[in-house]
Image (cartoon, rainbow, N blue to C red):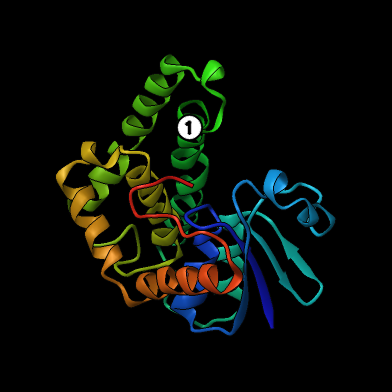
Amino acid sequence: MMTLYHCAAARSFRPLWTLEELGLPYELKMLPFPPRVHAKHYLGINPLGTIPLLLDGDTRMTESAAIAQYLVTKYGPTPLAVGIDEAAYGAFLNWLHFGEATLTFPQTLVLRYSQLEPEERRHPQVVEDYSKWFLGRLRAIEAVTATSEFMCAGRFTAADISVGYALLLAQRLGLSAHFGPSVAAYWQRLQARDGYRSAVEAENVASDAQGVPRRSQGSSF
């Protein structure tokens, strides 16, 4: 059985959501955030101290978008993947990685310099600048979702999971108030999915069972 190491509301929500959409069996191990500070034993499992970590036999993966791609490719066939013979294959890969590299990156700086650093090291200008960066890049999602229900291929795919996590993080950072109407409607559609709701429930159940505090819907990771 696969094992996923996860912190509530963190990037590891991408593989968790993917696992739930696929209906695959897995063991979920919850960690406090950041684990490299609050769960020192985890460094013996993942020297980077980052999450996610997916263990699948001899396979070890730590990149959230790559794990989503791995799962839908290895454990298909599934409509969550877009095949190389489909016209939308390039768009699928682009949006899958856009969600992490382009959308989540600036938000990590917003998070760090608004909440994680000690008060004396917080930097309102960095927070403002990278919030604007994120919202500027979000215009690409607004353009797509103005005419399409999902990011590509005319269906829900792992690319939507990748982008969807960035929207989840934006909500928890207080940036969702600036979503355009198409992005806001798209985010509502994603949250209505059974797979998304199951992932949230799995996170909460595992947090309670393992004694790791839940993250409230309005808080960041």
Residue depicted at 23% across the width and 44% down the height: 143
The answer to whether 105 is drawn above or below residue 53 in the figure is above
Q: Amino acid at mark 1?
A: Gln
Measured as percent of width and height from the top left, residue 195 is found at 39, 75
Residue 197 in sight: yes
- Determine which quarter of the picture holds residue 139: top left
Give the quadrant of residue 31.
bottom right
Choose between 45 and 21: the one closer to the eye: 45
Q: Residue furthest right?
A: 44
What secondary structure is marked by label 1? helix
Q: Residue at x 63, y 46 (%)?
A: 34
Left or right: residue 58 versus residue 173 is right
Furthest-front residue in view? 211
Left or right: 60 as drawn, with respect to 203? right
Please name whichever residue, 62 or 153, is drawn nearer the observer in this view of the structure: 62
Residue found at x 57% / y 62%: 212
Q: Quadrant of the N terminus?
A: bottom right
Q: Is residue 149 left or right of residue 170?
A: left
Residue 168 picture location, percent across and down = 37, 52
Residue 98 screen position, x and y as percent: 46, 45
Q: In the image, is 61 to the left or to the right of 165? A: right
Residue 25 place in picture, x, y as percent = 58, 85
| Disc 1 crowd, CA 10 A, few/some/many (<14, 14-19, 20+) | some
Q: Is residue 211 above or below residue 20?
A: above
Q: Residue at x 27, y 56 (%)?
A: 187
**What is the tally of numbered marks visible in this picture?**
1
Residue furthest to the left: 181
- Evaluate whether residue 83 shows in this view: no
- Which residue has dot 1 on it? 115
